[in-house]
Image (cartoon, coloured by chain):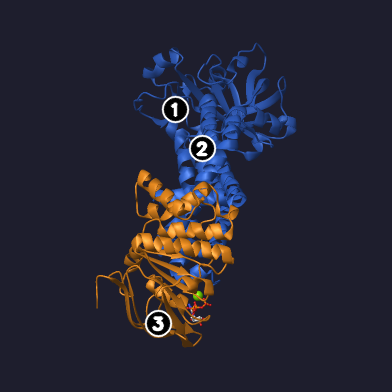
Chain colours: A blue, B orange
Amino acid sequence: MLLALRLAVRNLIGAGLRTWLNALVLSFSFVVIIWLKGIMVGWDHQAKNDMTDYEIGGGQYWHHLYDPYDPLSLSDSHAPVPSHVKDEIQAGDMEPVLVVPGHIFPRGRMQSVVIKGINPAQTIWKLPTGELDADTDAIPAMIGAVMANGTRLGQGDRVMIRWRDTNGTFDAAQILITAVFSSNVPSAEAGQVYVPLERLRKMAVMHDQATILTFRDGRSQRPEIEGWILKTKAELTRQVDDMIKAKTVGQSIFYGVLLLLAMLAIFDTQVLSIFRRQKEIGTYIALGYTRKEVVGLFTVEGAMHAVLAAFVATLYGLPFLAWQAKAGWTIPMEASEFGMAMAQTLYPVYTVGLVVSTALLVTLATAVVSYVPSRRIARMNPTDALRGKLQ
Amino acid sequence: MNGTSEIIQIQGLVKRFPMGKGEFTALRGITLTFGKGEFAGLVGPSGSGKTTLLNIIGSLDVPTEGWVNVLGNSIGTLSAKEAAQLRKESIGFIFQSYNLLQVHTVYENVEFPLLLLKHNGSQRRRMVMDALEWVGLVDKEKSKPPQLSGGECQRVAIARAMVKRPPLVLADEPTANLDAANSHHILKTMETLNRELHTTLLFATHDDKVIGYLRRMIYLLDGRVDRDETVRKD
Ligand SMILES: Nc1ncnc2c1ncn2[C@@H]1O[C@H](COP(=O)(O)OP(=O)(O)OP(=O)(O)O)[C@@H](O)[C@H]1O
Ligand SMILES: [Mg+2]
């Protein structure tokens, strides 16, 4: 095996330009796959961080009837805040949120919204809730950039809002947009209107009630609360994993094509090399190799392309990947057009497992592609090979 | 049979090749023996079967009929591994077109058979330098075959065949690509090595220059032994 490696290196270096071209093509696979996968991992991290920062904190308790995907559930999904979490709320480590369905009327059109009552003094989210603490005759309100774009509402605009109180009676008032925030979390923005918690409680006549209890510390074990469902951070961010997984399927096809191109180059080189080097093959056999050993020799030689490619890849790939991790990749499109949690600039994150598994994948594929054409050596007649007789 | 000095025994060897729908008979019943230390040649016109016979002796091919024993191994009953073992340990090959590994240096080419035999580093170094000295190429050890003349290439090939000091060396038309001066040079070298190392040398040739050096000539004609002449050269 050691001899085979030595021979392989000598033969590859001896083959010169062709070897390096192959290695270059193959190195693209290394770099691009690692880069794209790094983007995915980075995206996953960022999306989860953004969700944590703007929506879910360290985890939540949901009122047992609350279902964010079912607007009808919203009218009943509220209850008094359980008394034994009051201390935590007092300390600012838990924030109750009241969710009430409603409608706004921007430019005379009606749009259904979710009104979220939130404590202006909260410190769990990065939301600029301090802006809700405004002195105004209207109800101070805050919306996300996605919502602002869709309704063409901006800071300082007033708009009519309508809701039903706990008895089912319609009521309406003016809200004043005191802040527009940008979060990269569509679910925290689309169709959401944030107002001060106590105002909403009064508006809906739901004194001391809440729909969601968001806590800060997601690490410690949380107790069960009757009538409330514990949603851990992992559970709440699972949709990000699912989304990334769905994207990864599409990406895998891209890797496949990329890898296929590189493999074609290697395959082609192997076929040509076996055809052209028949005499050499015959010589190896005359010197005491079995045909099987020559198959091994050529397979190792082909597979060594992957090693050279890794070497070439580090030459230009390392600086590129490092630069990307620092500078990030700015998506040449509006992030919101993706309709999912995604920052405008993604910072790839490369894990050891990612690099190792990519290297293994590429090397394995190269070895297989090198082996397949080499098998025909085993069927060669050594005397024909020695004569270089074309077959 | 005198088992101690006879290293090749061939009895009733027939070799047929498949050809289209039928068969072509290249060797039609060869019976020969070669003793240790011979300097012999298979001589005959093109197509007479010289290479075919040499390949079978070298365990690169197998007999269709008959019995061939080389250094105690019955060719044709050997497994691929055993045949490879026989070639690796006991047989050196010299080819018309040298068949050197082009991307390897002269030193590495000569070293190759020793690597296969797993000799250790210092041992290899000594044996390679000895072999290069035999053929007068010590100063070219770092050159690669493309930088050498045809005569030099064939001398490297001789060194590669002899470096492991095998009991048997098979040379198929070793001078066919060489001019007269180079042919004489390498033939003298082989003659010397045959004498000093007691290596059995078996040629296949139709070159008169080679024939002039041979001590025994087996004339092949149409796959048969036509004449077997031993020359006394004292
Ligand atoms: N693999 C093969 N398949 C079919 N026929 C073959 C094969 N090898 C050799 N032959 C035939 O066997 C005959 C003897 O060939 P061989 O190569 O032994 O001749 P040779 O004496 O070495 O000739 P030359 O002096 O030209 O090298 C030739 O007619 C050749 O065409
Ligand atoms: Mg021949």
Residue B96 is labelled as none
Viewport quadrant of the C terminus of chain A: bottom right
**Residues at marks 1 and 3, CA–CA distance in whole angstroms:** 102 Å
Q: Is residue B93 above or below residue B135?
A: below
Q: Is residue A248 above or below residue A100?
A: below
Lateral position of residue A222 relative to residue B219, left or right:
left
Residue at point 38%, 63% (across, down) = B195
- Identify the residue under disc 1: A60
Q: Residue furthest right?
A: A107
Q: Amino acid at mark 2?
A: Val
**Residues at marks 2 and 3, CA–CA distance in whole angstroms:** 88 Å
Residue B228 is labelled as 3
Q: Is residue A13 above or below residue A282?
A: above
Quarter assignment of residue A33: top right
Chain to which the residue tagged by mark 2 belongs: A
Q: Amino acid at mark 1?
A: Gln
- Identify the residue under disc 2: A240
Lateral position of residue B54 relative to residue A267, left or right:
left
